[in-house]
Image (cartoon, grey):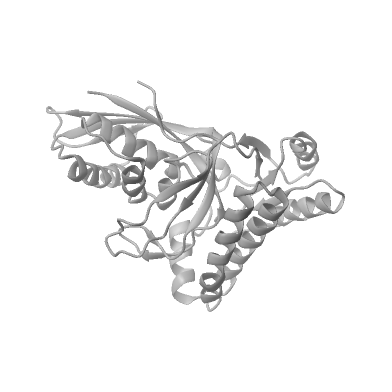
């Protein structure tokens, strides 16, 4: 029984930065994201008696053995949840410009969890899918849902209270996300490594933990009340604060490039002239600019005029998991 699921990527407005459990992907703080409409992963799963191991192709190409084993270990969690005992054939297609710094792991593991549960003939609530997806990639817990989504950090050691929930559905509060590509080079410090180093060595990290909860409370209030200005101020402040923690790590590191700073300065300059827009940056050099549909085109035009900008990918608020059999 072959089943196919689609899940979309998301961009965090309140960042997930730090794990309290590396194996279960349990975060040190709750986070909040927007699911994006333009970028997604389609994944098909079929369990088969004839297979003697799980197989995995990505974009019609077999993956490395290391990656296959990683996916197989994740599927072990699905088998444990569903009672399925057979190995599976997994085919996945990313509609995500990963070279531009978009995290396809969120949409990838979310789609894989959903398709695998269905292929096993089982059912799962969105909460259960979020818990499963989280164990492949933390941010995948949020891609189960559309709209504005909170990933609750939870307190339990087994992670059963660490899952995402929808704050506001898509189609309710329409915002634009301009994903600005300034670099396609692989970053020197991977997110997982950077996060771990920051947690273990940065004296600034405790300040992050002490204040991120207030950021989350305030931005949820702004989103529910559809207060774009307040939301933008909080998300920009939160992103800068997260990146500040990396400067205190030992050894220190920074994900930004000079091009990153130019885009940030351009956003601030446009805002001073009355064009309302705000930036956020994940663990990489590329910038996501949050604005309104009304001003999206004008802001995109001004950003494209910067010599450091390679490309821009406009997005709106997108949907949660769907099945496309």
How many numbered marks does the figure carry? 0
The C terminus sits in image quarter: top left
The x, y position of residue 9, in whole percent, is 49, 40
Residue closest to the eye, 11 or 105: 11
* Residue at figure coordinates x 33%, y 36% from the top left: 114
The N terminus sits in image quarter: top left
The x, y position of residue 80, in whole percent, is 18, 45
Residue 47 occupies which quadrant of the picture? top left
The x, y position of residue 149, in whole percent, is 50, 47
Q: Residue furthest bottom?
A: 203
* Residue at figure coordinates x 45%, y 42% from the top left: 143
Asked if one can make out residue 305 in the rendered structure from this viewpoint, the answer is yes
Asked if one can make out residue 251 in the rendered structure from this viewpoint, the answer is no
Q: Is residue 310 left or right of residue 7?
A: right
Q: Is residue 77 left or right of residue 298?
A: left
Q: Residue furthest front?
A: 225
Residue closest to the eye, 1 or 95: 1
Q: Residue furthest right?
A: 273
Vertical placement of 122 versus 251: above or below? above
Residue closest to the eye, 293 or 115: 293
Vertical placement of 66 versus 213: above or below? above
Q: Is residue 105 left or right of residue 125?
A: right
Residue 192 occupies which quadrant of the picture? bottom left
Vertical placement of 45 versus 33: above or below? above
The x, y position of residue 289, in whole percent, is 68, 46
Vertical placement of 42 versus 154: above or below? above
């Amino acid at each position: 029984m072959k089943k196919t699921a689609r899940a979309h990527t998301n961009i965090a407005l309140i960042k997930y930065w730090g794990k309290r459990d590396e194996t279960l992907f349990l975060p040190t703080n709750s986070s909040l994201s927007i699911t994006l409409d333009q970028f997604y992963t389609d994944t098909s799963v079929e369990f088969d008696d004839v297979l003697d191991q799980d197989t995995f192709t990505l974009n019609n190409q077999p993956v490395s053995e290391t990656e296959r084993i990683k996916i197989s270990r994740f599927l072990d969690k699905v088998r444990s949840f569903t009672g399925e005992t057979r190995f599976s054939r997994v085919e996945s297609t990313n509609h995500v410009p990963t070279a531009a710094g978009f995290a396809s792991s969120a949409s990838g593991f979310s789609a894989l969890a959903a398709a695998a549960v269905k292929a096993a003939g089982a059912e799962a609530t969105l909460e259960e899918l979020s818990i499963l997806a989280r164990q492949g990639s933390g941010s995948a817990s949020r891609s189960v849902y559309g709209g504005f989504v909170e990933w609750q950090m939870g307190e339990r050691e087994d992670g059963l209270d660490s899952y995402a929930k929808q704050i506001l559905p898509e189609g309710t509060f329409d915002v634009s996300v301009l994903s600005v590509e300034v670099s396609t080079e692989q970053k020197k410090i991977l997110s997982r490594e950077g996060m771990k180093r920051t947690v273990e060595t940065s004296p600034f990290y405790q300040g992050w933990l002490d204040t991120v909860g207030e950021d989350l409370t305030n931005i949820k209030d702004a989103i529910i009340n559809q207060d774009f200005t307040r939301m933008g101020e909080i998300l920009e402040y939160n992103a800068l604060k997260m990146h500040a923690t990396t400067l205190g790590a030992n050894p220190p590191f920074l994900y930004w490039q000079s091009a990153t700073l130019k885009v940030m300065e351009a956003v601030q300059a446009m805002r001073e002239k009355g064009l309302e827009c705000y930036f956020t940056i994940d663990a990489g050099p590329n910038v996501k600019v949050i604005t309104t549909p009304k001003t999206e085109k004008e802001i995109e035009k001004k950003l494209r005029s910067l010599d450091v900008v390679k490309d821009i990918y406009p997005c709106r608020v997108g949907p949660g998991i769907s099945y496309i059999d």
